[in-house]
Image (spheres, rainbow, N blue to C red):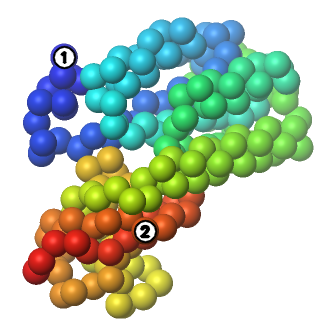
Amino acid sequence: EVLTTMARYDNLCKAIHLPVQSGSNRVLKNMNRRYTRESYMATVEAIREILPHCTLSTDIIAGFCGETAEEHLETLTLMEWAGFQAAFMFKYSEREGTYAAGKLPDNVPSEEKERRLRQIIDLQQRLSEKSNRADIGKVFTVLTEGFSKRSREDLSGRTDGNKVVVFPSRGETPGTFVKVKITGSTAATLRGEPVDKL
């Protein structure tokens, strides 16, 4: 119902943040999550069917209590399958009051957590670059937010998929919608040129 509502209205962003945390069912159970790898994948498939151009971001934890090397690989394969446009990625640390802090040993060595997190970050970098590269040549309606971080000659805004776009300023003010043709990209940002008249 939520997805069909999002598809029906143009004023709703086509971006969903869907935390996965891990690609392993055993780890998800230990995290006290109420979904499985399979049910998560079914949700992503529903998003793809109903909102085919929706961007998808997630949260991932590396080195949760007792996570094996094989379970870490399950997370990497799920990331590849989902093709997330963005992710918030962290190594596990105990949080007071959680089930894990009280019941599960924090037994993945710190160096191993760092190594796994680096693999997750590197993979997400590649996925983000691939997603943004696919947008080159497309035209998006961009909501202007203000000047870019690097130049007062460029503006920064967001697509309805929550992707950041940098484009030359023509005097637009925050809150202005601008049609922008994408001419380049990095893993984090799209670069473009305005194609509509002021």
Q: Residue at x 33, y 30 (%)?
A: 52
Q: How many marks?
A: 2
Q: Residue at x 77, y 42 (%)?
A: 119
Pinpoint residue 82: horizontal percent, then vertical percent.
Answer: 54, 28
Q: Distance of mark 1 from mark 2, alpha carbons?
A: 36 Å
At mark 1, the secondary structure is: loop
Pinpoint residue 5: horizontal percent, then vertical percent.
Answer: 14, 26
- Looking at the image, is mark 1 or mark 2 nearer the viewer? 2
Residue bearing mark 1: 1
Residue 30 in view, yes or no = no
Horizontally, residue 115 falls left or right of residue 43, namely right
| Label 1 Cα crowd, 10 Å radius (few <14 / some 14-19 / many 20+) | few
Snapshot quadrant of residue 196: bottom left
Horizontally, residue 66 falls left or right of residue 54, namely right
Horizontally, residue 65 falls left or right of residue 167, namely right
Disc 1 residue type (three-letter)? Glu
Snapshot quadrant of residue 167: bottom left
Q: Decide: is 34 above or below 105.
A: above
Q: Decide: is 172 above or below 191.
A: below
Q: Are the two marked residues, 1 and 2, in contact with CB atoms closer than 8 angstroms? A: no
Residue bearing mark 2: 183
